[in-house]
Amino acid sequence: MDILIKPLLAVVAAIGFAMVFKVRKEQIWLVGVFAFFGYLVRNIFIGMGLGIELSVLAGALCVGIMADIIGKKTKTQLRILKVPAGIPMIPGSFVFEAIKNLIVFVSSTTPDADKLSNFFYFGGKSVFILAALAFGLTASSVILKKTSS
């Protein structure tokens, strides 16, 4: 049951961000649907034992492909649909841990190599997750782009 609760919470977050991005009222539900399925795919891939980076990439590809297909039919700017639906997949806990370890390392009187290595570990993980998210959201446009002949 937990596999469905987090995607539903992602829908709430995505709809909130859709309002900030000024998505038209009749398209807000699309952003919620994209966020639900993207987060669901992410959770399924995590459950299969794949890393968080590949899971976010798969979820972002799902969001991107759905937004490309429906956005072209409704003649909507794709970023208006993709970005709010992808934002809930941003790794807040990894960024928090990286910054926390950096603050503890900098503020301590004696250098602690564990805190510094944890900062680089969580910071690197955050960067790769964000890169996977950006790549997944944009790669679908390249994959589905019609070639001009």
Image (cartoon, rainbow, N blue to C red):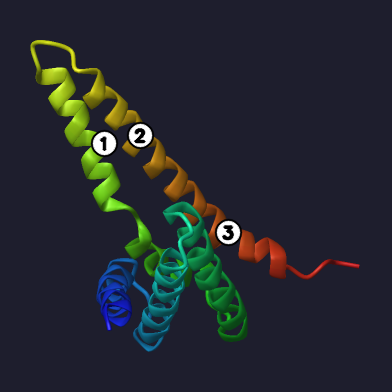
Circles 1 and 2, Cβ within 8 Å, touching? The answer is yes
Tag 1, which secondary structure? Answer: helix
Name the residue furthest bottom: 26
Give the mark nearer the N terminus: 3 vs 1. 1
Residue beneath the point at 44% across and 79% down: 37
- Please say if 82 is above or below 119: below
Identify the amino acid type marked 3. Thr
Residue 15 against residue 88 in the figure, above or below: below
In the image, residue 63 lies at what x, y percent?
50, 71
Q: Earlier in the sequence, mark 1 or mark 2?
A: 1
Task: Look at label 2 and name its amino acid.
Answer: Tyr
Q: Which residue is mark 3?
A: 138
The residue furthest front is 49
100 left or right, relative to 63: left
- Above/below status of 25 relative to 42: below
Q: Position of residue 50 (x, y in %)?
A: 48, 59
The residue wearing badge 1 is 98
Badge 3 element: helix
Residue appearing at x 8%, y 11% in the figure: 109
| Distance from the alpha carbon under mark 2 to that under mark 3 | 26 Å
Residue 2, label in figure: none
Q: What whole-number distance in Å separates the C-alpha atoms at marks 1 and 2?
A: 8 Å
How packed mark 1 is, by other alpha carbons closer than 10 Å (few <14, some 14-19, many 20 or more), is many
